[in-house]
């Protein structure tokens, strides 16, 4: 009988961060739902097993096809990129390694060797030291897959939040918010929510300015760029409303009164999701998913947490959520996504 659990490639993230630890902690929680193969360094994963006082064994392999998915064993496609491990340190070679894992994951997903990819956290400073042109995963994913229209989707229980702009300065974001770009994000959000099983999603679109501009008193961008985009989306049959005041609409979304929210810039969308997903430890749960790509990709909601890396105390809730979301999305699309079976 064909194995029903999808194959999820989990990239290890920056070797100096908590990515390896949260993979170690998350795997036992999801082993019944997915077949996981780690894309990273076997020695770093072994160190994380020790730091977390886990009973897992690490098995170094050369390719996904070599994975056995045995109980209590982490199959690691071993890049052997890390000559010496120093937790919590910004290093260019670590930044390059974290990109290597992601780029291999994209190749494997595009080739159908894995059904989905789940990314551990990478570090922007380390990427910069590596000479990378990318500040994070999203633009890299779009470029490597040839995708023009895409969006970051944050998921935390009832909250589904996408972004018109992400990793750029606030001034650049303001300049980038055009009618065409807002409309495209609404359309991608509509399709992404449908892919998640919401047949006719309702979408609230945030304004850019306080109180969505107060009819032009607090800025004209909401009337000039955002409102026309919403009107065009409505004409196309999308249930979109706005521009909505951002200080109110996220509360409505959190209790399920709308299915999705389109935020204009990074912090406008991230802050309410992070607060909603706050854990007692100060960590955060939830999923970061890129929609509009030809592959399934999820990630954690948090960063590399260099300050606690190597201590074995990092919360794995977001990694658990992200792995599960990748598995569910892959399973739902397994009729169309090629597999290695």
Image (spheres, rainbow, N blue to C red):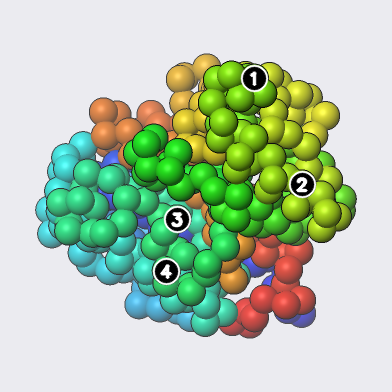
> In this orientation, which residue lies closer to the viewer: 263 or 48?
263
State the image quarter where residue 123 is shown.
top left
Does 293 appear above or below 135?
below
Of helix, strand and loop, which one carries label 2? helix
Pointer 1 and pointer 2: residues touching (CB < 8 Å)?
Answer: no
State the image quarter where residue 154 is shown.
top right
Looking at marks 1 and 2 on the same chain, the residue that comes earlier in the sequence is marked by 1
Does 107 appear above or below 69?
below
Query: x, y percentage for residue 36?
Result: 53, 61
CA distance separating discs 1 and 4 = 38 Å
> What numbered label is drawn on residue 143?
4
State the image quarter where residue 195 is shown.
bottom right
Does 150 appear above or below 20?
below
CA distance separating discs 1 and 2 = 18 Å
Instruction: Answer with left or right where residue 131 lies relative to residue 11.
Output: left
Is residue 96 shown to the viewer in this render? yes
> What numbered label is drawn on residue 231?
2
Looking at marks 2 and 3 on the same chain, the residue that comes earlier in the sequence is marked by 3
Pointer 3 residue: 138
Q: How many marks?
A: 4
Of helix, strand and loop, which one carries label 4? helix
- Closer mark to the observer between disc 4 and disc 2: 2
Pointer 1 and pointer 4: residues touching (CB < 8 Å)?
Answer: no
Please give the name of the residue rendered at 48% of the width and 74% of the height, measured from the top-left corner: 146
Pointer 1 residue: 214
CA distance separating discs 1 and 3 = 33 Å
Please give the name of the residue rendered at 67% of the width and 64% of the height, measured from the top-left corner: 330
Quadrant location, the C terminus: bottom right
């Amino acid at each position: 009988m064909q194995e029903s659990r999808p194959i999820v490639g989990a990239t290890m993230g920056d070797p100096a961060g908590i990515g390896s630890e949260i993979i170690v902690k998350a795997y036992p929680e999801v082993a019944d739902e997915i077949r996981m193969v780690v894309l990273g360094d076997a020695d770093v994963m072994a160190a994380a097993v020790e730091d977390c006082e886990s009973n897992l064994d690490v098995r170094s392999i050369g390719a996904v096809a070599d994975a056995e998915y045995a109980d209590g064993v982490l199959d690691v496609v071993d890049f052997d990129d890390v000559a010496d491990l120093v937790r919590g340190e910004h290093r260019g070679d670590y930044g390059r390694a974290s990109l290597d894992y992601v780029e291999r994951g994209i190749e494997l997903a595009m080739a159908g060797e894995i059904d989905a990819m789940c990314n551990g956290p990478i570090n922007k400073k380390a990427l910069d030291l590596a000479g990378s042109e990318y500040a994070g995963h999203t633009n890299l994913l779009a470029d490597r897959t040839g995708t023009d229209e895409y969006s970051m989707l944050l998921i935390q229980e009832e909250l589904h939040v996408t972004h018109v702009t992400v990793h750029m300065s606030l001034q650049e974001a303001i300049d980038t918010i055009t009618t065409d770009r807002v409309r495209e994000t609404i359309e991608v959000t509509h399709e992404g929510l449908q892919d998640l099983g919401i047949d006719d999603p309702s979408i609230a679109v945030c304004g850019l300015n306080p109180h969505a501009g107060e009819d032009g008193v607090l800025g004209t961008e909401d009337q000039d760029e955002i409102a026309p985009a919403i009107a065009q989306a409505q004409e196309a049959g999308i249930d979109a409303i706005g521009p909505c005041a951002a200080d109110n609409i996220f509360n409505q979304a959190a209790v399920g009164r709308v299915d999705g929210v389109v935020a204009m810039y990074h912090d406008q969308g991230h802050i309410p999701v992070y607060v909603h997903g706050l854990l007692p430890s100060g960590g955060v749960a939830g999923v970061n998913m890129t929609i509009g790509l030809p592959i399934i990709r999820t990630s954690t909601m948090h960063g590399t947490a260099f300050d606690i890396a190597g201590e074995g105390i990092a919360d794995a809730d977001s990694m658990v959520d992200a792995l599960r979301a990748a598995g569910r999305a892959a399973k739902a699309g397994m009729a169309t996504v090629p597999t290695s079976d």
